[in-house]
Image (cartoon, rainbow, N blue to C red):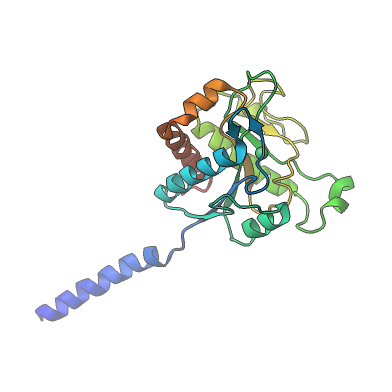
Amino acid sequence: MRVLSKLKIFLLAVLIFLPALGRAKAVIVLDAAHGGSDPGLKYGSEVEKEWNLRFALALEKALEEEGFEVVQVRHKDETIPLDKRAERANTAQASAILVIHADGEWAGERSGPMIIVEPPTQGGESTEIPRWGVITPYQYRMSLKLGRDIAQALGFGMELSSLSDSRGTAGEALNDTARLYCLPHQGLRYLAPPAVVITPLFLSNPSDVKRFSADQAAADFAAQVARGVANFLQY
Ligand SMILES: [Zn+2]
């Protein structure tokens, strides 16, 4: 009798926890842009490809802590052409893709973070991008939601309702303080799942570089982005 009760309890426990065990984790793809023979932006002694990888690794850790499975397009200093990157990202069955670029501008005043969403493809352009199809209005809306959720998790005090659904700049207009842009971006055009470019910092801005030189600052930033992704996927 005792043995039977124990067996019953064990079976009950299996029934309760089995669905949780069987549930696959959502996959997030991280694409640390540039790499290998393509250094990306060089600004003084700062090299973009190194910063991108550094943030990708910090994001991997933070996303795993949120319970996601992470697929890195590159986890080392490797040359990967754009079409190969898209292929890796698109075949991972990802729920979201984060493409990481550092940026720069001449005045050295602009600071990160900045988020870019690819607008929907217009008719005239569709012949240029036959391989992975076009950015549909639905895809754009999903990517915009991903961008908004990350922006909110980062604490950007922007007027989200002012964002435009049409092609063109969204957010606080194309000025030095905007955080979320709707702009065509080569690195997003071939991606099927919701995708955004995240620019944590501007290499041209000494205070950005100083701030993120501390590993803790990169980790804190990554944790906020990961929370935004979790909010987006209601994870
Ligand atoms: Zn770049």
In the rendered image, residue 12, in percent from the top left (x then y), is placed at 26, 71
Residue furthest to the right: 124
In the rendered image, residue 74, in percent from the top left (x then y), is placed at 57, 53
Residue furthest to the left: 2
Q: In which quarter of the image is residue 42?
A: top right
In the rendered image, residue 169, in percent from the top left (x then y), is placed at 74, 30
Residue in the foreground of this view, choosing between 229 and 51: 51
- Answer yes or no: is residue 230 visible: no
Ligand 1's image quarter is: top right
Q: Is residue 214 left or right of residue 112?
A: left
Please determine whether, in this image, residue 165 is positioned above or below residue 30.
Answer: above
The residue drawn where x is 68% and y is 18% is 107
- Answer yes or no: is residue 64 visible: yes
Image quadrant holding the N terminus, namely bottom left
Q: Is residue 24 left or right of residue 185?
A: left
Q: Is residue 121 left or right of residue 213?
A: right
The residue drawn where x is 15% and y is 76% is 5
